[in-house]
Image: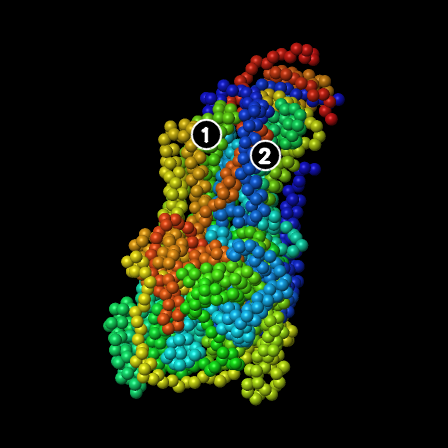
């Protein structure tokens, strides 16, 4: 048996091999071509998805008031996107707005009303019922009101407008208190004042970035946090992608390159606080060059005489040639637009500086024309602009508290203990107040000091409405509706106020039982002022369509004419900025800027924001101090070295980051980190530069001059590795981000329609 | 070697080998226990930990997704070369000095292959699905992707493992037979089974010879292909520093280089501790030394070519990668590698060095350290330095990785220790062949022979 | 009655000589058993032919064919377009072919060895333990006592150290 | 003989590079670097849409971020003339993708829409695709990531959550493409309209720097913009034939 015959063997082998192959091929060739198209593996994303429900609402992550539409599935919010029909953001939404979901689903939310049991700030609370909590508060208010001491009640709220603000007003009026403050750290007091002072407008104008051809931004980081970043971004994009005519040019003037600076075509570093002087220098040039041909030319040249480019050049550190060139461009490119804000506006000379910017716009004839700056009409409805508390009024509040003039402080949303410099001693002021009530839904620095916590809904769970303050050139209002039912035992701020009102017995003047009614009522009034065809449809339809669209607007534009009178012109002038601390002891100027991720710190408890690399530095989880490379070299510091930043008013510890685009005598720190409370994601992370700011104020508005603090750096000798996602942020001659001289004139080498795959093998 | 061996008769060898198997002192058990324990603690426990927590237990990160696991994998594959390869070549060129050492050399091949194969499972993210890389009909109607260099790996290594197992087994059938008669109990049963009833008839010897020769012929190209394929895992990518045509020969040479060094180490250990002084002699070290010297020169040459490729390319990608390798964080390792693998081996030019045992041992270990470094550098200096500088990163092994690396040596040792107690670790019959056959003796008339 | 006689020798030469004489004396080809392969067996007992090489060759052939078939046909039946490559990509599949050629070659060689050398042994066969150590044994079968005595004579003549009667052969 | 001819037909067919005669759709994205402000809204959008895990500070420190789309930043020049260029980088869905060929288990392949799809439940985690990808846009799950409750309630039910040991990457929001296709089918349309499907990043981009669409539709917005003279492909020299086209930054 063992001796296999060779022929036998050969046959076997042949048959086996060939047979197998041929057989497969045969079976193969009988197949229908369609069988090949999809492999037998299906990517898991391919399962067909369910039907989502979309709700239109309003984003309240910052004060811009963008429209959002929220995608919900099975009663859970899944994604926030921009509301396409909302004129402010036109369907787009910034990262922070999208992270609103994590406000709703944040694991650190306060889920029940709480009453303090232990020491203040000891975080010892007991859970109580709403009845109990509201009862206690109402009782106190009742007593004070009866005792005619209603003014000892203070309501300190985050910036709200619309009918909630109105409700606050009438509520406080009923209590007999005039202590209603809206406090936002980044509220542009100086900008309002400047426009009031120069244009006589108490509302912000509309800055038409979309149609402008040269934008001159004095320190305003308009792409991330200046007034209405989304709308400005849209304008920026539109102007950059303009097909028919030449693309818009953007110039950014600031001591530290912001995102807007990076996006700009030119970044000019003027020494901090002198932006206004620079603006006047340009104005001077324009007038002297006869660009401005107005009747009052003489007044102008008189007013601007002290600001000849040469003098301005030595004050600002910007070369004279640059100043004149910019001035000529600004006058020559029509329409052009100058805006100011950010750090530049937060100096001791903030208002004057912004007036100077307005002067530029006026001289170049940009006022009231497309592509320039347009005046907004009065916001819709009867909503007046609520009083915004400046730093000064916060100081006064603290003072009053120390005097024992405040018995009850109700805090809604805002977090002054974090955003006010330690020098304001607001924490101490709180100690002097017998009853501190917080309506916040997070344990932020202020809330932990509260005696009574009545947690409010997140904005995705509550009714509200918003009339974008910045406006879009015409009247816009938007209603925000709950997109999910409340996750926890919390109530909407409006409802809390309403039920308080009922208990105190204000039902005559505040009749509504729920915020929804209140809002609906308010919108009925707006509806009644509406134009005929709106009225024709009847209110219910109007209301329904409003909720569907999420936004309402009518195209009535504001005034376009403007003539400044003599004494305004005469009064124009920008003083040199004042800094606290002597230059010898404190060689550096601290430049705190709003972090794109955390805004004024409210975003620090959102894990998405914490994990999103900072756009400019790619640092995640933590804060840093930015140094010019040469400065760092002089001090012998490298990235990650821990330094103490010492101001006359305290010190913070932060690692060094070498930042190529910052002036050598300026150091910059992002605001937003350095929370001592505020949930697991924010607690004890990074440093808060606001702590060490000097209580320097802009005289007219009492706005805190956040950029007017001098500091010194003290190396601690310790070193940490900055957690950042970027490796080497230099393309080593690899031409990865390619640039072209001028659009259209260079034919790209990239094979556009790409080689058909049949050519590859 | 004749000079040393002709004192010994067939029986002596027989005795020695059988003793090496049957007689086990406490020293052996102590070593085995330590090795085994070390393997358990340093290799398996960390691995299980990693299985539980995920690859995150290792130090790999975004740009550096490959780490020491792959380096060790290549190292062990490399070590596995030359064992069998060498013995095949020497068998075909029938150089008799091979005979005393080839068995243990092949064993080394076998076990380093086993360790390497284990490393595949340690490396992948979901080892419990690793069988998907094998072509077998399944309910998803899915087959592996035969275009993938990694699949070539699977194929090549599976083949190589089979091949070298069979090769070492075939070679030792007669010895199993010989030992069989001298053992009792379970050993006897085992050897009876292993020896397949070998009797040593002239036919059997003849068949064995041919089969063995054919196997040798087949295994040589296989061994060469295996490491070429392993190198293609890298070379077929477009990663700067890996995308090099020289890689296949580079890896093959490197493999044989480290493998031969490994043999020297094992030779020394066997000679010293298994008592084979008479069989493993200066001659072996001398010849292996010569071989090592040639290989080291080859290796140096190819290494230089690799550098020049990067340098002359002039592209930022290659250049940055190269400068990071030569002067970056891992530069000390690089120069250490050059010292151990290119400079130190030049000592072997002198016969005195080649024929002195301890220095050769030290050198061989040094070479293998250098070769491990090479593999590590290939992974650690190229992946984190790719085309987009913004995505650059840095890779450093974690504790788990390091301990698994150490543990793998323990695993290898354990396996080897078990081997020497089961296989006759010196090929008896071939050593007997090398000795002169017994002298003719006057025949003794048989008493009581039938009339 | 046929018996099997084994002569044990101290050295290969005499064993070989004895084997040769037996063969010439008309015994059926005797069997040698030795601890090492003996040179020159073929001169004495005639050439040996083995079919192992055929196994190796055809094994390789089958391996090659089935290797390429496996790769290409599975790819065709379950097409997975990757990297813009064709479904049948020759160069990679050649590598699979190469590996499987060798694998099958090896396996068939082993098979060939087993078959041709009658291993593994199932039945219990005549065996001389010493032959595994240092003795060279020559085994021959004798039909009758006459044969037997002649075999003894030849063994003694060749200088066998010992002549062993393995008794009845099956 | 007929068998032979059949065989030859099959042979010709399967020797044809690319296998697909042509794609059903050829999804393409263009990125206008001149408009990109690096605001990273796209990153958050992607995280929200695709259930991308939060890896935590420690893991980030180890360089184990998971960002299907990331912003790369490249500084140019020194103070005072420093410039910073941003570049969004996501899976380029190459038609000649190096990552596809290397996967031993075919866990990633090119589908009939010209998408480079990753099949999570087939992946065994050799991570070789990440090595072969020159854009380094493939991210590996080193752990089983978890979401602090109730953050997990935000997870998108249309996208699977990846477990440990699995490679993942940008899919051009394939679930949205699928929805759009279904919609088109329901309306008895043969094809998806231009602009009907947008990945999360494109949808959210505040400056409309990203456009997405079907390259085969010569009317489509993406076709227009990829024919812009500024168009180029990153690492084009590697001949990956990517489906993401960048428009050069204008340096005026």
Q: Residue at x 42, y 49 (%)?
A: B381
Judge whether B170 appears above or below C79 on screen.
above
According to the picture, the residue beneath numbered tag 1 turns out to be B284
Q: Report, in whole angstroms, how far the alpha carbon at label 2 lies from the one at label 1.
A: 23 Å
In the rendered structure, find residue B349 and report the number of the disc placed on it. none
Q: Which residue is drawn at 65% across and 24% down?
A: B184
Labels 2 and 1 in the same subunit: yes
Farthest residue to the left: give it. A310
Q: Which of B307 and A1 is in front in this view?
A: B307
- Residue B106 point in image, percent of width and height: 53, 35
- Taking the image as shown, residue C27 lies to the left or right of residue A306, namely right
- Residue A579 point in image, percent of width and height: 32, 64
Farthest residue to the top: give it. B447
Q: Nearer the viewer, residue B138 or C22?
A: B138
Which chain contains the residue that carries disc 2? B
Contact between marks 2 and 1 (CB within 8 A): the answer is no
SS class, disc 1:
helix
Residue A761 seen anywhere in this rendered image of the structure: no
The quarter of the rendered structure image containing the N terminus of chain A is: top right
Q: Residue at x 66, y 28 (%)?
A: B186
Callout 1: few (<14), some (14-19), or many (20+) C-alpha neighbours within 10 Å? many
According to the picture, the residue beneath numbered tag 2 turns out to be B170
């Amino acid at each position: 048996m063992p001796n296999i015959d060779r022929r036998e063997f050969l046959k076997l082998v042949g048959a086996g091999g060939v047979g197998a192959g041929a057989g497969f091929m045969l079976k193969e060739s009988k197949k229908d071509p369609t069988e090949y198209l999809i492999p037998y593996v299906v990517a898991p994303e391919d399962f067909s998805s369910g039907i989502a429900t979309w709700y239109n609402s309003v984003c309240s992550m910052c004060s811009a008031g963008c429209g959002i539409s929220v995608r919900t599935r099975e009663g859970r919010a899944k994604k926030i996107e921009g509301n396409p029909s909302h004129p402010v953001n036109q369907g787009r939404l910034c990262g922070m707005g999208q992270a609103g979901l994590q406000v709703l689903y944040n694991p650190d939310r306060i889920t029940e009303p709480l009453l303090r049991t232990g020491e203040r700030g000891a975080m010892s609370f007991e859970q109580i019922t709403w009845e109990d909590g509201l009862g206690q508060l109402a009782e106190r208010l009742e007593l004070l009101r009866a005792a005619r001491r209603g003014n000892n009640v203070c309501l300190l709220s985050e910036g709200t407008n619309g009918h909630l603000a109105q409700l606050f007003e009438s509520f406080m009026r009923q209590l007999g208190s005039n202590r209603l403050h809206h406090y936002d750290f980044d509220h542009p007091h100086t900008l309002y004042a400047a426009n009031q002072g120069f244009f006589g407008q108490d509302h912000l104008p509309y800055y038409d970035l979309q149609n402008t051809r040269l934008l001159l931004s004095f320190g305003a980081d308009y792409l991330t946090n200046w007034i209405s970043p989304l709308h400005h971004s849209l304008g920026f994009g539109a102007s950059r992608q303009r097909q028919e005519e030449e693309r818009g040019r953007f110039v950014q003037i600031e001591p530290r390159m912001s995102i807007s600076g990076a996006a700009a075509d030119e970044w000019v570093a003027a020494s901090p606080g002198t932006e206004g002087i620079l603006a006047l220098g340009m104005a001077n040039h324009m007038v002297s060059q006869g660009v401005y041909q107005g009747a009052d030319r003489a007044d102008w040249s008189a007013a601007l005489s002290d600001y000849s480019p040469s003098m301005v050049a030595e004050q600002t550190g910007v070369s004279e040639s640059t100043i004149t060139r910019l001035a000529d461009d600004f006058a020559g490119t029509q329409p052009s637009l100058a805006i100011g804000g950010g750090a530049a506006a937060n100096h001791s000379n903030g208002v004057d500086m912004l007036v100077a910017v307005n002067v530029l716009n006026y001289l170049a004839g940009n006022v009231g024309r497309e592509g320039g700056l347009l005046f907004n009409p009065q916001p819709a409805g009867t909503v007046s602009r609520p009083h915004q508390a400046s730093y000064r009024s916060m100081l006064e509040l603290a003072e009053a508290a120390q005097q024992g003039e405040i018995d009850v402080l109700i805090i809604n949303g805002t977090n002054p203990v974090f955003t006010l410099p330690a020098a304001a001693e607001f924490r101490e002021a709180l100690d002097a107040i017998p009853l501190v009530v917080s309506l916040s839904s997070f344990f932020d620095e202020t809330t932990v000091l509260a005696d009574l916590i009545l947690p409010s809904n997140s904005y995705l769970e509550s009714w509200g409405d918003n009339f974008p303050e910045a406006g879009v050139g015409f009247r816009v209002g938007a209603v925000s509706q709950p997109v999910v039912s409340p996750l926890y035992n919390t109530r909407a701020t409006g409802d809390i106020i309403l039920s308080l009102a009922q208990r105190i017995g204000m039902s005559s003047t505040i009749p509504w039982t729920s915020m929804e009614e209140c809002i609906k009522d308010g919108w009925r009034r707006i509806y009644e002022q509406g134009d005929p065809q709106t009225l024709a449809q009847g209110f219910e339809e109007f209301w329904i369509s409003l909720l569907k669209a999420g936004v309402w607007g009518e195209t009535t534009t504001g005034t376009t004419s403007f003539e400044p009178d003599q004494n305004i012109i005469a009064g124009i002038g920008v003083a040199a900025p004042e800094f606290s601390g002597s230059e010898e002891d404190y060689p550096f100027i601290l430049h705190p800027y709003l972090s794109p991720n955390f805004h004024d710190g409210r975003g620090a408890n959102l894990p998405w924001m914490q994990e999103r690399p900072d756009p400019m530095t790619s640092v995640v989880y933590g804060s840093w101090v930015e140094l010019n490379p040469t400065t760092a070299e002089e001090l012998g510091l490298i990235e990650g070295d821990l330094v103490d930043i010492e101001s006359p008013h305290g010190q913070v510890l932060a690692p060094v980051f070498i930042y190529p685009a910052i002036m050598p005598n300026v150091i910059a720190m992002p605001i937003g980190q350095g929370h001592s409370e505020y949930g697991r994601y924010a607690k004890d992370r990074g440093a808060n530069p606001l702590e060490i700011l000097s209580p320097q104020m802009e005289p007219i508005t009492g706005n805190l001059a956040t950029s007017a603090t001098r500091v010194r750096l003290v190396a601690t000798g310790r070193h940490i590795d900055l957690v950042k996602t970027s490796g080497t942020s230099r393309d080593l001659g690899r031409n990865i981000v390619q640039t072209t001289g001028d659009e259209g004139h260079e034919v790209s080498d990239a094979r556009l329609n790409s080689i058909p795959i049949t050519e590859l093998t | 070697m004749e000079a040393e061996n002709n004192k010994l008769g067939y029986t002596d060898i027989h005795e020695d080998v059988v003793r090496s198997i049957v007689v086990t002192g406490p020293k052996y058990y102590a070593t085995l226990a330590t090795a085994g324990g070390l393997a358990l603690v340093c290799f398996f426990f960390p691995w299980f930990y990693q299985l539980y927590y995920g690859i995150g237990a290792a130090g790999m990160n975004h740009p550096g997704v490959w780490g020491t696991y792959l380096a060790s994998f290549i190292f062990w594959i490399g070590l596995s070369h030359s064992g069998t390869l060498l013995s095949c070549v020497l068998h075909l060129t029938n150089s008799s000095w091979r005979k005393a050492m080839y068995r243990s050399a092949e064993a080394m091949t076998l076990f380093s292959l086993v360790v390497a194969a284990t490393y595949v499972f340690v490396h992948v993210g979901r080892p419990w699905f690793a069988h998907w890389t094998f072509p077998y009909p399944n309910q998803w109607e899915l087959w592996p992707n035969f275009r993938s260099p990694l699949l070539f790996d699977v194929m090549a290594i599976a083949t190589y493992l089979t091949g070298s197992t069979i090769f070492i087994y075939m070679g030792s059938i007669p010895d199993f037979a010989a030992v069989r008669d001298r053992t009792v109990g379970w050993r006897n049963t085992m050897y009876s089974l292993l020896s397949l009833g070998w009797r040593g008839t002239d036919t059997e010897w003849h068949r064995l010879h041919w089969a063995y020769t054919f196997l040798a012929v087949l295994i040589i190209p296989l061994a060469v292909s295996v490491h070429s394929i392993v190198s293609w895992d890298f070379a077929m990518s477009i990663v700067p520093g890996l995308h090099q045509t020289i890689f296949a020969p580079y890896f093959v040479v490197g493999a044989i280089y480290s493998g031969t060094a490994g043999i020297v180490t094992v030779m020394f250990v066997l000679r010293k501790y298994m008592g084979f002084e008479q069989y493993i002699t200066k001659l072996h070290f001398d010849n292996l030394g010569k071989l090592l010297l040639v290989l080291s020169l080859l290796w140096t040459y190819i290494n230089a070519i690799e550098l020049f490729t990067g340098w002359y390319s002039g592209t930022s990608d290659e250049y940055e990668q190269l400068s990071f390798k030569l002067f970056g964080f891992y530069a000390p390792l690089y120069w250490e590698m050059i010292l151990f693998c290119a400079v130190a081996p030049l000592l072997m030019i002198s016969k005195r060095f080649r024929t002195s045992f301890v220095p050769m041992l030290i050198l061989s270990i040094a070479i293998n350290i250098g070769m491990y470094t090479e593999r590590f550098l290939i992974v650690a200096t190229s992946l984190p330095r790719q085309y987009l500088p913004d995505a650059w990163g840095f890779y450093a092994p974690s504790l788990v990785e390091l301990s698994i690396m150490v543990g793998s040596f323990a695993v290898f040792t354990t396996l080897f220790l078990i081997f020497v107690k089961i296989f006759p670790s010196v090929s008896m019959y071939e050593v007997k062949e090398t000795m002169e056959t017994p002298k003719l003796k006057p025949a003794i008339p048989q008493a009581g022979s039938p009339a | 009655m046929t018996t099997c006689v084994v002569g044990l020798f101290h050295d290969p030469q005499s064993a070989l000589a004895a084997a040769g004489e037996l063969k010439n004396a008309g015994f059926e080809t005797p069997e040698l058993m030795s601890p090492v392969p003996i040179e020159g067996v073929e001169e004495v007992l005639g050439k040996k032919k083995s079919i192992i090489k055929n196994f190796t060759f055809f094994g390789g052939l089958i391996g090659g064919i089935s290797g390429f078939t496996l790769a290409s046909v599975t790819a065709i039946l379950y097409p997975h377009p990757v990297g813009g490559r064709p479904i049948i990509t020759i160069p990679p599949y050649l590598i699979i072919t190469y590996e499987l050629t060798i694998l099958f070659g090896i396996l068939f060689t082993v098979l060939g060895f087993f078959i041709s050398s009658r291993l593994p042994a199932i039945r219990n066969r005549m065996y001389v333990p010493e032959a595994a150590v240092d003795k060279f044994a020559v085994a021959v079968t004798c039909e009758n006592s006459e044969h037997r005595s002649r075999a003894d004579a030849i063994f003694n003549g060749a200088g066998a150290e010992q002549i062993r009667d393995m008794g009845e052969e099956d | 003989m007929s068998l032979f001819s059949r065989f030859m037909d099959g042979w010709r067919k399967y020797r044809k590079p690319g296998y697909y005669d042509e794609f059903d759709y050829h999804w393409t994205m263009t990125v206008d670097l001149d408009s990109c402000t690096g605001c990273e809204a796209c990153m958050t959008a992607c995280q929200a849409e695709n259930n991308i895990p939060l890896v935590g500070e420690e893991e980030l420190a180890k360089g184990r971020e998971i960002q299907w789309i990331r912003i790369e930043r490249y500084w140019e020049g020194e103070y005072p003339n420093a410039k910073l260029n941003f570049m969004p980088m996501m899976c380029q869905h190459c038609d000649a993708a190096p990552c596809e060929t290397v996967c031993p288990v075919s866990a990633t392949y090119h589908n009939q829409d010209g998408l480079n799809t990753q099949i999570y439940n087939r992946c065994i985690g050799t991570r070789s695709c990440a090595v072969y990808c020159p854009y380094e846009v493939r991210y590996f799950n080193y752990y089983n990531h978890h979401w602090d409750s109730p953050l997990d309630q935000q997870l998108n039910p249309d996208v699977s959550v990846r477990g440990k040991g699995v490679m993942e990457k940008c899919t051009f929001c394939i679930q949205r493409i699928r929805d759009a296709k279904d919609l088109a089918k329901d309306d008895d349309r043969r094809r998806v309209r231009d602009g009907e499907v947008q990945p999360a990043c494109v949808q959210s981009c505040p400056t409309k720097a990203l456009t997405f669409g079907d390259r085969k539709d010569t009317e489509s917005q993406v076709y227009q913009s990829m024919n812009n003279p500024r168009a180029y492909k990153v690492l084009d020299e590697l001949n990956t034939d990517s489906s993401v086209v960048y428009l050069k930054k204008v340096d005026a």
